[in-house]
Image (cartoon, rainbow, N blue to C red):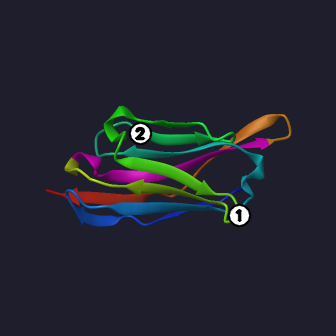
Amino acid sequence: QVQLVESGGGLVQAGGSLRLSCAASASFSSINSMGWYRQAPGKQRELVAGITSDGRINYADSVKGRFTISRDNAKNTMYLQMNSLKPEDTAVYYCNAVYIVLITHKVYWGQGTQVTVSS
């Protein structure tokens, strides 16, 4: 069982920045892909940014140019740098990881961290 622990959420004014971290209890060497999702009240969970094992990155259109996903393989930690935050970025942010286990994939989620952007 892999545990993902997010941190770094909080309250920030519009235009501000936050950096989220996601620490995994297992090595990234077995990772297929990782990503950050978010869910605002009354809305479906959506992909914010994703990164594959070979380094391909994709972003939701709404965060392109403002958010940056990265990872530190030595620390088994993934990050989401969020700049120029807007009130519509307010949501619970979840870390996601897909691990390769033998011939299958297992999906893991963190517990979520609240990000609130005030106007």
Which residue is at the front of the view, 33 or 25?
A: 33
Quadrant placement of the C terminus: bottom left
Residue 22 picture location, percent across and down? 55, 60
**Labelled pair 1, 2 in contact (Cβ < 8 Å):** no
| Left or right of 98, for residue 68 | left
Residue at the spot of label 2: 45
- Residue 95 sits inside the magenta stretch: yes
Say how many tags the image has. 2
Q: CA distance from mark 1 to mark 2?
A: 29 Å
* Residue 68 in the image, given as x and y percentages of width and height: 44, 49
Q: Residue furthest right?
A: 102
The residue shown at (63%, 41%) is 55
**Label 2 sits on what residue type?**
Arg
Q: Which residues are magenta?
A: 88-100
- Residue receiving disc 1: 74
| Position of the N terminus by quadrant | bottom right
Residue drawn 58% across the image and 42% down it: 51
Report the front residue among 57 and 11: 57
